[in-house]
Amino acid sequence: MRKITKIAVLTSGGDAPGMNPCIRAVVRTAIYNKLEVVGIRQGYQGLIDNNMYEMNTRSVSNILNLGGTILKTARCLPFRTDEGMETAYNNIKAQGIDGIVVIGGDGTFTGALRFSQRFPDIAVMGVPGTIDNDLYGSTYTLGFDTATNTVIEAIDKIRDTADAHDRLFFIEVMGRDSGAIALRAGISCGAEAILLPERATAIDDLIESLKAGQFNKKSSSIVIVAEGDKSGGVYDLAERVRGQVKFYDIKVTILGHLQRGGSPSAFDRILGSRLGFAAVNALIAGKSQMMVGLEANHIKLTTLEEALTQHQFKLEDDLMQMSEILSI
Ligand code: F6P
């Protein structure tokens, strides 16, 4: 069995609330088990630039409540090249690191898998950190709960003003390929319609349901549109509806990056702690090329290969249907 004496931790791709509690858990679990720990700054870019520092128990004091990531993050194109990976490998070897915990989403895991297939002597363990909740092998990813609550808070406020003015709001939420936030926020805020990348929505059907809402004496309507919806963009969509829905004044709000920030929820703090703890223990147990996830409230290991090939938020048709019925 491979022996691990020194590990590194990095965050990569889009930041997600819960990454800091996870970093804290990785560092302290490693030190508890008498391993050395190195923090890599700016994701894979830090591996290439040799931007690393020794961490101790105090390096992660008072970060449980912080959004973002103390290690910073980046989407690193050079790591996709053979040359970039080789430079990273040489830097890792020079530091005597024999295992890495990578916290991020599908892009992060793709890099981790390719790297560890090329350099199998470095063990890699993935932790699912993305607000998109679209990784196979974990019911929830870090940041999804906090981001959804942030969206709900914002939409509740929009509902107040929409109701006061009898308006229809189109609200774009994050999710380039994933409707996870849109669906959960839609149910939580009583959205009249939810548009997602995973399912095409006929504009005529949307207009009919908005007309039905007006007939049923609704004073306001909220349509949540996930960023990756294929209807042609939220402004374009609003224009097309404006031509046919005369009874509402129509407004558009794009929530944007505020969805990624903020103090992690209790759920994300606990999830980050559990996954970070489990990731280090899995490395110590000799595992590599895997992701730690949470399924049915139990830690589960999935191969990175499986997590990636099956990646994507699976649309829960039953929840969509329920949401439509409850918003009549
Ligand atoms: O992957 C998380 C995510 O927030 C997506 O939902 C969104 O499309 C993307 O990141 C935005 O990335 P960036 O911050 O690089 O614009």
Image (spheres, grey):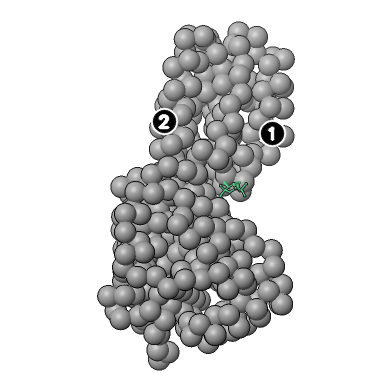
Mark 2 is on which residue type?
Glu
For residue 244, above or below residue 236: above
> Looking at this view, is 196 or 23 the one in front?
23
Relative height, residue 116 to residue 258 (above, below): below
Q: Earlier in the sequence, mark 1 or mark 2?
A: 2
**Image-based side of 44 in relation to 232, left or right:** left
| Quarter containing the N terminus | bottom left
Q: CA distance from mark 1 to mark 2?
A: 23 Å
Residue 272 in view (yes/no): no
Mark 1, Cα crowd under 10 Å, few <14 / some 14-19 / many 20+, is some
Q: Is 206 drawn above or below residue 146 in the view shown?
A: above
135 and 71: which is toward the camera:
71
Q: Are marks 1 and 2 in contact (CB under 8 Å)?
A: no
Q: Is residue 159 left or right of residue 204?
A: left
**Residue 84: x percent and y percent?**
68, 74
Q: Which mark is residue 153?
A: 2
Which is more toward the observer, 238 or 44? 44
Percent position (x, y) of residue 180?
50, 44
Q: Secondary structure at mark 2?
A: helix
Question: Residue shown at 34%/49% (left/top)?
Answer: 65
Q: Which residue is mark 1?
A: 233
Which residue is located at x 39 percent, y 85 percent? 5
Q: Quadrant of residue 77?
A: bottom right
Measuring 56% from the left and 28% from the top, which residue is drawn there?
171
The image shows residue 80 at horizontal and vertical percentages of: 68, 69
Q: In the image as oriented, which residue stretches furthest toward the bottom?
A: 1
Q: Residues within 10 Å of mark 2 (few under 14, many from 20)?
A: some
Label 1 amino acid? Gly
Q: Select label 1 or label 2 by which is in front.
A: 2
